[in-house]
Amino acid sequence: MKEFAIIETGGKQYMVATGDLVKIEKVKGALGKDGYAEYKVGDKLTFENVLLVDNGSDTTIGTPFIDGAKVSAEITKISRAPKVVVIKYKAKSNSFKKRGHRQPYFEVKVTGIK
């Protein structure tokens, strides 16, 4: 069995293994004097909120996170999800609202679990 980890990012938990492609919530860059830095395709990410690591013979569980454990990844795609249309309608009151939303995401490739 290959090594895997469970990480937390964007308020969600993901089970990842080396070589996996995972869609995660958009991550803000480091805060500088001009605001938050923008990530680009090819940039490296490090996830330090690791909840569990299993290498096939030994399982480590964090309380809530494992000290010193890291998962490294590389951004392969930056895009937005398909549009979600929200319609509010009330009959007989001339009330109609239509709104759309596209959630931004990063597609990352996991390069290593430490």
Image (spheres, grey):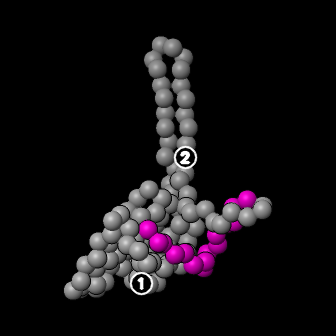
Looking at the image, which is closer to me, 12 or 85? Answer: 12
Which image quadrant is residue 7 in? bottom left
Identify which residue is drawn at 41% across, 78% down: 69
- Amino acid type at circle 1 is Lys
**Percent x, y of residue 37:** 69, 66
Identify which residue is drawn at 63% across, 66% down: 29
Density class for disc 1 (Cα within 10 Å; few <14, some 14-19, many ≥20) is few
Residue at image mark 1: 114
Which numbered mark, 1 or 2, is in the foreground of this view?
Answer: 1
Looking at the image, which is closer to me, 57 or 77? Answer: 57
Mark before the other along the chain sequence, 1 or 2: 2
Residue at image mark 2: 101
Q: Is residue 47 magenta?
A: yes
Give the extent of the magenta segment.
35-49
Let me know if residue 100 appears in the view.
yes
Let me know if residue 76 appears in the view.
no
